[in-house]
Image (spheres, rainbow, N blue to C red):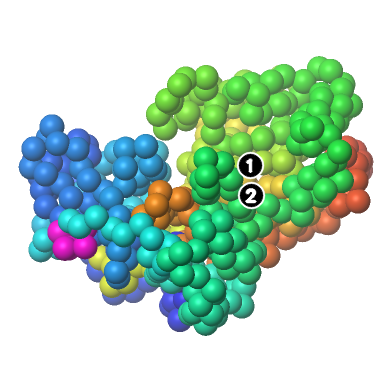
């Protein structure tokens, strides 16, 4: 999660994966987040990310979270996304004035430091007029967005000009159109705005991807273009043709697997999450379900004595990084640093500025040749899974470049309740390469989706990859 990337990237990449000298030490054992009331009451501000949390010493009183900028402090409502939805543990670092908060499933830590009191702007009701909502929008991006330089956008200039077209008498429609005009300049798959105007809800994504756009344009005469695409991709392409009606669906139909030939295994992963039918599954529920499912997959490949495996991520909508690492662990022979992650908007951290994430070797695993297939429809945690797999020596990356939206989604809310999302983190692969914006480029290029007819291409790509693998098996 970042803002101006250039100065920070120089220092980040200098120490990435090599271990930084003279980094500050830290200590403190993890405690359940439910204990934070009695151990660390007070007001805490995140280092980066733009969060403020007010912790009462009364366990019965909920922690109040705020989205904060230089001029705004907007309380997160009960029905809105909160950073506390994704964490369950904390520890003190260096002294009683710093906390590191994380999840048992996701070791990446976010630092909070104690502040003396709740700022006055947090205790007053924020204005809800057009210009105040505009200014809050501008500040959220100005303080936290990472990639203005990458997309060549002078945020201060373009937003100053755009503000001149608005007044407090402007309609909300004019405001959202202004937002869309600004966000359209950021070709970022994790940048969006969701708004409700006159009772009608809508969402704009700055970069839905080439294939997604082609589906909407080329299949627009259908009531549900994505359903038409999905039927071709899943039913006709994967089920009937690639797996010859012998494939197996698991994990709430997020993963399909089987054989493309007698000795080549195939696994399509559509998402990193949503693996259970529980109404509100925990991270542990998701991980438990995935581990059981992956046991079935690897046992199947071993039973059929496959000599290579295709992992098809060509349509992957993302999800959670820890599930990406868990999937990759089933193809790893040893613990491997897969990628690094850092918050570009964090400053003077007690934590290491770059945190490395590893793939560990799973108990049941396939360590023969693996080929991962991607496209521009591979996004977010699907791209993290791609990074994890590419770090393994037995993996070859094939297909098209991924979407290039690797940073976690940082969600903020304007005073009127509209939701915006942005990217404020830097991910780098095991070789210190940054792929944000351009997408992770494959080692072997194969066209996956035809932009003139998105119903074509994928099946032919898998068949071509199968031919390449069969040829390599024969030559061994």
Q: Contact, CB < 8 Å: mark 2 with mark 1?
A: yes
Q: Secondary structure at mark 1?
A: loop
Residue at the spot 45% in from the left edge and 50% down from the top edge: 418
Residue 121 as seen in the image, left or right of residue 239: left
Vertical relation: 452 (above or below) 71: above
Going from the N terminus, do you reach mark 2 or mark 1 first?
Answer: 1
Q: Which residue shows up at 39% across the image and 52% down it?
A: 416
Q: Nearer the viewer, residue 137 or 376?
A: 137
Tell me if residue 150 can be seen. Answer: yes
Q: Position of residue 156 (x, y in %)?
A: 48, 79
Q: Position of residue 165 (x, y in %)?
A: 54, 74
Residue located beneath label 2 in the image: 379
Q: Quadrant of the N terminus?
A: bottom left
Q: Quadrant of residue 12?
A: bottom left
Determine if the magenta segment contains residue 141.
no
Is most of the magenta stretch helix, strand or loop? helix
Q: CA distance from mark 2 to mark 1?
A: 6 Å
Q: Secondary structure at mark 2?
A: loop
18 sits to left or right of 36: right
**In the image, what residue occupies the spot 61% across and 78% down?**
152
* Residue underneath mark 1: 317
Residue 316 x %, y %: 67, 41
Residue 457 vertical placement versus 279 (above, below): below
Residues rendered magenta in the picture: 118-122
């Amino acid at each position: 999660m970042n803002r101006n990337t250039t100065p920070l990237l120089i220092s980040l990449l200098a120490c990435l994966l090599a271990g930084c000298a003279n980094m500050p030490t830290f200590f403190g054992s993890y405690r359940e987040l439910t204990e934070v009331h009695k151990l660390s009451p007070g007001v805490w501000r995140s280092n980066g990310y733009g969060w403020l949390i007010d912790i009462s010493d009364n366990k019965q009183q909920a922690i109040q979270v705020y989205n904060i900028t230089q001029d705004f402090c907007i309380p997160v409502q009960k029905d809105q996304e909160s950073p506390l939805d994704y964490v369950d543990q904390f520890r003190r670092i260096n002294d009683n004035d710093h906390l590191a908060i994380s999840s048992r499933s996701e070791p990446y830590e976010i630092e909070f430091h104690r502040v003396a009191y709740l700022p006055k702007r947090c205790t007053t009701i924020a204005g809800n007029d057009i210009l105040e909502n505009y200014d809050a929008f501008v500040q959220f991006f100005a303080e936290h967005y990472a990639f203005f330089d990458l997309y060549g956008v002078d945020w201060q200039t373009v937003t100053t000009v755009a503000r001149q077209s608005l007044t407090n008498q402007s309609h909300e429609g004019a405001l959202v159109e202004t937002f869309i005009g600004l966000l359209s300049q950021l070709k970022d798959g994790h940048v969006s705005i969701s708004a409700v105007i006159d009772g009608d809800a809508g969402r704009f994504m700055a970069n839905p991807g080439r294939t997604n756009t082609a589906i909407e344009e080329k299949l627009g005469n259908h009531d549900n273009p994505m359903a038409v695409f999905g039927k071709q991709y899943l039913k006709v392409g994967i089920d009937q043709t690639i797996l010859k009606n012998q494939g197996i669906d698991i994990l709430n139909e997020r993963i399909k697997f089987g054989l493309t030939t007698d000795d080549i295994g195939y696994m399509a992963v559509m998402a990193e999450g949503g693996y259970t039918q529980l109404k509100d599954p925990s991270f542990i529920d998701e991980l438990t379900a995935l581990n059981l499912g992956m046991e079935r997959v690897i046992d199947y490949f071993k039973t059929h004595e496959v000599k290579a495996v295709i992992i098809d991520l060509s349509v992957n909508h993302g999800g959670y990084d820890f599930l990406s690492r868990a999937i990759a662990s089933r193809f790893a022979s040893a613990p491997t640093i897969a990628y690094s992650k850092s918050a570009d908007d964090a400053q003077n951290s007690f934590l290491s500025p770059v945190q490395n994430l590893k793939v560990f070797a799973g108990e049941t695993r396939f360590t023969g040749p693996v080929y991962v297939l991607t496209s521009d429809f591979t996004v977010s945690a699907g791209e993290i899974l791609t990074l994890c797999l590419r770090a393994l020596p037995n993996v070859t990356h094939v297909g098209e470049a991924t979407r290039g939206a690797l940073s976690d989604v940082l969600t903020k809310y304007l005073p009127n309740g509209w939701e915006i999302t942005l990217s404020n983190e830097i991910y780098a692969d095991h070789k210190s390469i940054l792929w944000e914006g351009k997408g992770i480029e494959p080692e072997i290029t194969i066209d996956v989706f035809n932009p003139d007819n998105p119903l074509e291409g994928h099946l032919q790509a898998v068949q071509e990859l199968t031919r390449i693998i069969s040829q390599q098996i024969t030559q061994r």
